[in-house]
Image (tube, rainbow, N blue to C red):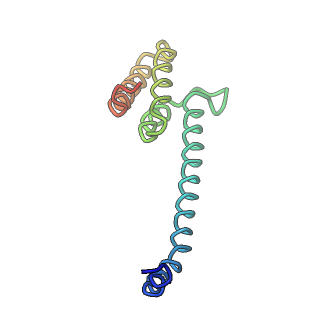
Amino acid sequence: MSFWSWVGENSNQIGILTATLPVVWAAVQYLASKRTELKHRQFETYHSLIKALVQREDKDQPMMLDRQIAIVFELRNFKDYFPVSLRILRGLKETWADYGPEEKRRRLHEELDLSIRHISKKVGGKI
């Protein structure tokens, strides 16, 4: 069987494939674009959370403890950033060892410990 006779016998399937390829290619391009957009949004959100965790909004006002606790908890949702989050949280725990009143410090350190344990389990000793 020659190539041309095969093409003649399969022209319907070749036509369907030819018509489908641009749609499939457009879908692949759309998904790749959305993935890039999602990665960028995740990057922006993660970095704004880190900034809010360690930097006062108003230098004349104290850090908001419950906000810091919530941010430490939220870092558990950023799997791509687990290695750096773990290093940041461990460093903050050390840096904040004597930070603020004892009662507030205890609450923040409990959340740091919980997040460090959670992320460590998810990373599974890869760090």
**Viewer-side residue, 119 vs 27:** 27
Quadrant (top left/top right/bottom left/bottom right) for the C terminus: top left
Residue lying farthest to the top in this orientation: 98
Quadrant (top left/top right/bottom left/bottom right) for the N terminus: bottom left
Q: Percent from the top left, x then y, of residue 12?
A: 45, 87
Q: Percent from the top left, x then y, of residue 97?
A: 46, 13
Q: Residue at x 47, y 17 (%)?
A: 101
Q: Residue at x 47, y 39 (%)?
A: 80
**Viewer-side residue, 36 vs 114:** 36
Q: Percent from the top left, x then y, of residue 19?
A: 53, 80
Q: Is residue 47 above or below residue 89?
A: below
Q: Residue at x 50, y 17 (%)?
A: 96
Left or right relative to 32: residue 70: left
> How many numbered circles does the render carry?
0
Q: Residue at x 52, y 61 (%)?
A: 31
Residue lying farthest to the front in this orientation: 1
Q: Percent from the top left, x then y, of residue 63?
A: 56, 28
Q: Is residue 127 above or below residue 79?
A: above
Where on the picture, by quarter, is residue 33? bottom right
